[in-house]
Amino acid sequence: MWDSGPVEGTTWAALTAALTVAGAIWTWIAFRRRGAANGLRAMGFTLLPAAAWLTGTLEMVVEIAGSVTDWATGLVFNVLTWSGVGLAGLALVLFVVSGFIRDRQLARAQANGGAPDSAKATPTRRTELPPASARATGGSPIDDEMADIEALLKRRGIE
């Protein structure tokens, strides 16, 4: 029928029959215990091995499963592969830690008045804004706020 390689067609037929019988038992139990909806779903799953055998895809699924198994066992038992996985994990940790350190440096530089290098920045003494009573009276609240902002910018050397 199909070129089945090392496994003969009768072996595939036997595998299909075993899966179908197991599915039929599962279908019967599902009908009895859980009702028609679950029984019909189980019957659909029961018919899949027979459909796969008749279309030739059962062999393909078994070959794919075998290839994935070979790859996984090679991954698990290969020292070089695990060395690569370890290096990838170390690289990930380094990326994350460097991001935290960079964020802290930027926050520290921003707190020190925008100095680019936080280690060389000299701490500046912060002065409070004058109280509302000391401000020029007679202007609107918006003008008072603008005056505060202008005073703050002048103290920072920004005009």
Image: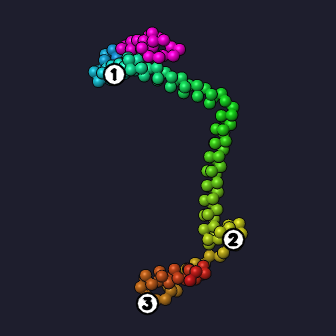
Q: Which mark is residue 121?
A: 2
Q: Quadrant of residue 27?
A: top left
Q: What amino acid is at disc 1? A: Gly
Q: Who is closer to the viewer here, 53 or 89? A: 53
* Residue nearest the viewer, comparing 87 with 154: 87
Q: Earlier in the sequence, mark 3 or mark 1?
A: 1
Foreground pick, 55 / 88: 55
Determine which of the numbered discs, if any, sits on residue 86 in the image.
none
Specify which label sits upstream in the sequence, 2 or 1: 1
Task: Give the labeled residue for mark 3.
Answer: 138
Question: What is the number of the mark on residue 44?
Answer: 1
How is this picture coloured?
rainbow
Tell which of 85 and 151 is nearer to you.
Answer: 85
Coordinates of residue 98 in the picture (x, y in percent): 64, 54
Quarter of the C terminus within the rendering: bottom right
Distance of label 2 from label 1 (alpha carbons): 73 Å
Magenta region includes residue 11 = yes
When the figure is inspected, residue 39 is found, relative to residue 109, above or below; the finding is above
The quarter in which the N terminus is drawn is top left
- Disc 2, SS: loop
- The mark that comes first in sequence, 3 or 2, is 2
Q: CA distance from mark 3 to mark 2?
A: 40 Å
Q: Which residues are magenta?
A: 1-25
Looking at the picture, how far across and down is residue 46, in whole percent? Answer: 36, 18
Rendered position, 16 above or below 139: above
User: From the viewer's perspective, is residue 146 above or below residue 30?
Assistant: below
Q: Image point 66% across, 44% down: which residue? A: 90
Instruction: Assign the magenta stretch its main secondary structure.
Output: helix
